[in-house]
């Protein structure tokens, strides 16, 4: 049966808000950053419908199986196949008045808007995060530095989604439920903290669908006059809540802003921070103050390296080639070029989340560079670092895929790494040599 023979059209208009930065990579490198963002005709960041449909298909197929996914999302294999019954539009970014523009929007109007004028800038240094690829020994790999340009936390997008059927369909609720899952991440590096979203509003017709065999529904479908209702779903992803309490403070560097009031001479090393969009009803704007940020990748990288130690201890294998898998790729994921045997990448089964800190206190510490040969101080090598003060408690979450084998050695290694984090044996960030970054939380559960 052709899709044109279907008369029922399930429809929803979805508004989402970024809970962590979105890396919407266009695949093109730019003059300032390694990868540029996807942008619409107005020059504003946007999420392609193919991106959303691909994420939905992957999650749907994991739950319902490949054959059922082919019926809904379509497929093509040689001379066989069928078109998709699902339609997903592009997601368009909201302005400061909580409205989105999918038609032409003038440059003058963009410049007048508090949010859009910042997002329009293609080389805005506030929306860039540096990363370092770690080697098998847990240190920075040669030529392993790269950056990601992102859409900042708090930005909102709206897109529409529709499903053609010839009768009532249970698959519609299964598709919408995916949007409410903590494992639904948009863009690159979702397992490392990026791409987490929250559904702000989902509007559907009162009957969930338009019956296009009826004149009334045809008119409502054309004019969008159908009354809309909101629908909510429960997140069913298992989560581990992680409490962080750094007794002596911590420093995750790379920042550009000082958090010490009236500091006329900022330190040489500043805590990493980002700008965040805050909403008050239908009014949005960037917060006046930057927020100190603990990237999900900082927690993920430390736990993976420590888990690799525990796995080596279990397997009694302490040496491996540089290109050899550490045994944790199924749990933590790996890039395609790190699996020498098959040259295939893997997404991993753990999702980490960026943590944005509010009302944090910091302090400045003067340091001397040490001559590694003599052990003495180096002339003219005094520098300052700004660290987050200890005694402050923060909470983040790690989300688990339902398919994880909790009896495996890999998962046991991960649990031991968490215990090390809990007991103050594993540091996050820099400065661990002088006590920074060690966590003394009461519990990890």
Image (cartoon, rainbow, N blue to C red):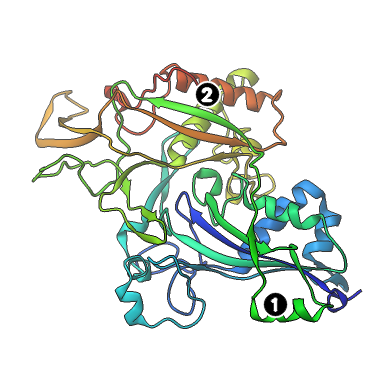
Answer with the quarter of the image where residue 10 lies: bottom right
Is residue 112 found left or right of 219 in the rendered image? Answer: left
Residue 72: give x, y in percent of width and height.
80, 62
**In the visual, does 432 lie left or right of 264?**
right
Q: Nearer the viewer, mark 2 or mark 1?
A: 1
**Residue topped by disc 2:** 417
Relative to 58, does residue 428 appear above or below in the rendering? above
Q: Residue at x 32, y 33 (%)?
A: 430
Q: Position of residue 330 (x, y in %)?
A: 66, 38
Relative to residue 348, is residue 403 drawn left or right? right
- Give SS at disc 1: helix
- From what the image shows, is residue 227 above or below residue 341? below
Q: In the image, is residue 180 above or below residue 99?
A: above
**Which residue is at the front of the view, 406 or 106?**
106
Q: How far apart in space, not on screen, are marks 2 and 1 (Cα)?
A: 56 Å
Of residue 69 and residue 281, the one placed in the foreground of this image is 281
Q: Residue at x 76, y 76 (%)?
A: 217
């Amino acid at each position: 049966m052709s899709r044109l023979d279907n008369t029922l059209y399930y429809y929803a208009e979805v508004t989402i808000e970024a809970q962590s930065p979105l890396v919407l990579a266009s695949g093109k490198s730019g003059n300032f950053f390694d990868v540029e963002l996807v942008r619409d005709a107005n020059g504003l960041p946007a999420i392609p419908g193919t991106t959303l449909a691909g994420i939905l298909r992957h999650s749907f197929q994991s739950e319902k199986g490949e054959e059922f996914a082919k019926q809904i999302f379509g497929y093509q294999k040689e001379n066989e196949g069928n078109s998709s019954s699902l339609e997903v539009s592009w997601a368009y970014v909201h302005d400061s008045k909580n409205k989105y523009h999918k038609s032409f929007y003038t440059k003058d109007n963009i410049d007048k808007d508090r949010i859009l004028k910042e997002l329009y800038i293609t080389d805005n240094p506030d929306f860039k995060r540096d990363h370092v690829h770690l080697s098998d020994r847990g240190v920075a790999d040669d030529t392993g530095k790269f950056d990601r340009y992102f859409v900042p936390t708090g930005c909102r997008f709206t897109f529409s989604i529709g499903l053609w059927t010839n009768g009532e369909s249970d698959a519609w609720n299964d598709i919408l439920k995916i949007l409410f899952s903590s494992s639904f991440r948009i863009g690159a590096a979702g397992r490392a903290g990026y791409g987490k979203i929250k559904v702000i509003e989902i509007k559907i017709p009162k009957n969930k669908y338009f019956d296009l065999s009826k004149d009334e529904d045809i008119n409502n479908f054309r004019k969008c006059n159908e009354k809309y209702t909101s629908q909510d779903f429960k997140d069913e992803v298992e989560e581990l809540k992680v409490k962080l309490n750094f007794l002596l403070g911590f420093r995750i560097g790379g920042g550009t802003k000082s958090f010490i009031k009236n500091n006329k001479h900022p330190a040489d090393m500043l805590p990493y921070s980002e700008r965040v969009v805050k909403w008050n009803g239908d009014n949005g704007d960037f917060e006046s103050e930057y927020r100190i940020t603990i990237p999900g990748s900082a927690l993920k990288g430390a736990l993976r390296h420590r888990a690799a130690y525990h796995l080596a201890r279990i397997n009694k294998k302490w040496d491996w080639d540089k290109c050899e898998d550490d045994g944790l790729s199924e749990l933590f994921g790996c890039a395609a070029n790190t699996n020498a045997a098959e040259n295939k990448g893997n997404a991993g089964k753990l999702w980490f989340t960026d943590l944005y800190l509010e009302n944090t206190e910091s302090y400045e510490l003067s340091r001397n560079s040490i001559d590694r040969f003599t052990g003495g101080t180096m002339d003219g090598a005094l520098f300052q670092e700004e660290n987050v003060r200890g005694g402050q408690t923060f909470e983040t979450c790690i989300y688990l895929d339902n398919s994880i084998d909790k009896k495996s050695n890999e998962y046991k290694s991960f649990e031991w790494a968490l215990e090390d984090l809990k007991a103050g044996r594993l540091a996050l960030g820099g400065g661990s040599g002088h006590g920074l970054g060690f966590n003394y939380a009461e519990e990890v559960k």
